[in-house]
Image (cartoon, rainbow, N blue to C red):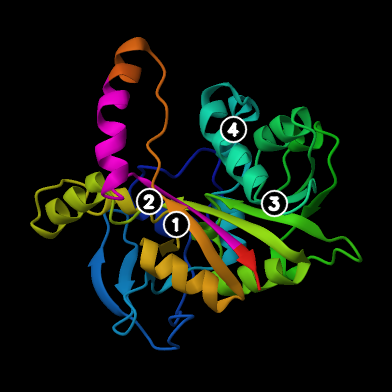
């Protein structure tokens, strides 16, 4: 029996999670087509595994899509303040600046996959872009943007003749059931020489690497919590993300691990001190990758 979830499962007990997500399915590496080797079980009972050939990490077995949508991606997943760009403006504008530099012509059609509450769509409209969105659960906040929206997983959506100069996956690909299929569908709907933007957590950031060793040595009470396995099904390094994107039909143009701007005077001062050295060793908590369709 599936238990109805009316509040977030983040941080809840393993028993609560298993009641809400009782069904698990096996998955092989999408790059090597091999079953992975398990290396850990997190504090909520999610199984973490690694491909023995390419090193791509992912959950195996994992929760099934239908139960994740009901238990994780409901109303509590996108609170009202997610619709605001205020706290993320610096990072979003950095993405726009790079995309606008890389485009070969002044094209402005973009698809935001996993548009959430629509914060990116709002900022895009203010900068003169035409941005449409998709999500597995389309929120009322996103509908208020007036953009064209499609509900569902990207490979299952029919766009007709619509094509996009940029397809954006920002903290989305790690949530998908089949990331290679998602990227291949993006390749189909992007224009000739169009761009792909992918942002994902960096598994080998400085902070995540430290937490991984703490988990391996049983120094954390909630082991492997930094993987976020309640809603993250895939865990990328720069090398595994690049390989996935290239397999889907794109050429990687640039990737980086930016350190986000912080609010507050002290936080901004600390960030200014650590940004350059952390980014120089690719140690930031996020990978942002830009690629061009072949």
The residue carrying mark 4 is: 93
- In the drawing, what numbered circle is on residue 103? 3
Left or right: residue 55 compared with residue 233: left
Residue 193 at what x, y percent from top left? 71, 65
Q: Position of residue 125 (x, y in %)?
A: 78, 32
SS at circle 1: loop
Q: Residues within 10 Å of mark 1 (few under 14, many from 20)?
A: some
Badge 3: residue crowd in 10 Å (few <14, some 14–19, many ≥20) = some
- Distance, label 1 to label 2, CA atoms, is 6 Å
- Look at mark 2 in the image and give the residue it sits on: 228
Please state which of the two labelled residues, at mark 3 or mark 4, is closer to the viewer: 3
Q: Nearer the viewer, mark 4 or mark 2?
A: 4
Q: Is residue 272 magenta?
A: yes
Residue 232 image label: 1
**Mark 3 to mark 4: distance in Å?**
15 Å
Of the numbered discs 2 and 3, the one sitting upstream in the chain is 3
- State which region is magenta: 270-291
> Disc 1 or 4, which lies upstream in sequence?
4
Q: Which mark is residue 156?
A: none
**Residue mark closest to the camera, 3 vs 1:** 3
Q: Residues within 10 Å of mark 2 (few under 14, many from 20)?
A: some
Residue at (80% x, 37% y) in the render? 143
* In the image: residue 275, left or right of residue 127: left
**Separation (CA) of disc 3 from disc 1:** 31 Å
Give the quarter of the figure containing the C terminus. bottom right
Q: CA distance from mark 1 to mark 4?
A: 25 Å
């Amino acid at each position: 029996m599936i238990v109805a979830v009316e509040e977030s499962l983040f941080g809840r007990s393993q028993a609560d999670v298993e009641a809400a997500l009782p069904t698990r399915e096996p998955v092989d590496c999408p790059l090597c087509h091999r079953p992975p080797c398990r290396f850990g079980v997190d504090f909520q009972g999610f199984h973490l595994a690694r491909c023995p050939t390419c090193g791509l990490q992912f959950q195996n077995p994992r929760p099934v899509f239908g139960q994740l949508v009901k238990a994780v991606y409901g109303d509590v997943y996108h609170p009202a303040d997610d619709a605001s760009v205020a706290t993320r403006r610096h990072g979003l504008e950095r993405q726009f600046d790079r995309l606008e530099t890389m485009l070969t012509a002044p094209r402005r059609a973009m698809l935001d996959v996993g548009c959430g509450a629509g914060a990116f769509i709002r900022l895009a409209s203010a900068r003169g872009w035409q941005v449409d969105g998709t999500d597995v659960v389309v929120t009322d906040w996103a509908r208020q943007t007036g953009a064209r929206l499609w509900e569902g997983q990207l490979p299952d959506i029919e766009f007709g003749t619509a094509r996009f100069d940029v397809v954006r996956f920002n903290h989305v690909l790690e949530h998908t059931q089949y990331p290679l299929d998602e990227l291949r569908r993006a390749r189909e709907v992007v224009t000739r020489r169009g761009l792909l933007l992918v942002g994902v957590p960096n598994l080998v950031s400085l902070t995540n690497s430290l937490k991984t060793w703490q988990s391996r040595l049983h120094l954390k009470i909630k082991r492997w919590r930094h993987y976020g396995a309640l809603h993250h099904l895939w865990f990328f390094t720069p090398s595994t993300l690049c390989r996935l994107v290239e397999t889907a039909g794109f050429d990687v143009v640039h990737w980086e691990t930016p350190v986000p701007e912080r609010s507050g005077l002290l936080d901004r001062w600390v960030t200014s001190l650590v940004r350059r050295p952390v980014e120089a060793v690719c140690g930031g908590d996020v990978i942002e990758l830009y690629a061009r369709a072949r």
